[in-house]
Image (cartoon, rainbow, N blue to C red):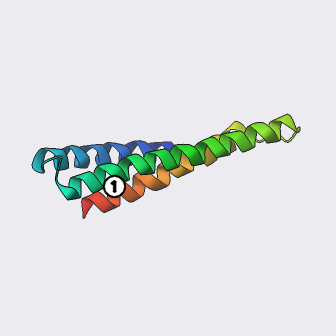
Amino acid sequence: MMGMELWSSSLSTIAMRQQLWQTQPFFSPSMMRENQRMVTEKIEASMEAGLVMQKAFISAMSGQYAPWWITSQKAMKPYHRRSSANSRRLSH
């Protein structure tokens, strides 16, 4: 379920960002802030997901295995949270 929500909110966010890029000059201060925020959020989400995967790997090395569906849900959560927030923010 989370994967489908992530997919749909990502598609709507991409569509709204493309509309912004078509209607505003890329060098405007608001677009520069939005683009910087987009990149920063992607980096933060990938760092959080990487940390989840690193914790799962270290736990597995010590004999504490988590099912793949729990690990994958934890790894997708940062992307899902930010994608949903972006979709809500850009729609207003």
> Does residue 2 appear in the picture of this structure?
no
Taking the spot 74% from the left edge, 41% from the top edge, the residue there is 56
Please provide percent x and percent y for residue 62: 88, 39
| Residue type, numbered disc 1 | Ser
Taking the spot 22% from the left edge, 58% from the top edge, the residue there is 30
- In the image shown, does 8 or 89 lie closer to the viewer? 89
Taking the spot 36% from the left edge, 55% from the top edge, the residue there is 86
Taking the spot 36% from the left edge, 54% from the top edge, the residue there is 37
Q: Is 87 placed above or below 58 here?
A: below
- In the image shown, does 44 or 8 lie closer to the viewer? 44
Q: Quadrant of the C terminus?
A: bottom left
| Residue holding disc 1 | 87
Q: Residues within 10 Å of mark 1 (few under 14, many from 20)?
A: many
Is 24 on the left-hand or right-hand side of 40? left
Is 51 on the left-hand or right-hand side of 16? right
Is 2 on the left-hand or right-hand side of 91? right
- In the image shown, does 5 or 47 lie closer to the viewer? 47
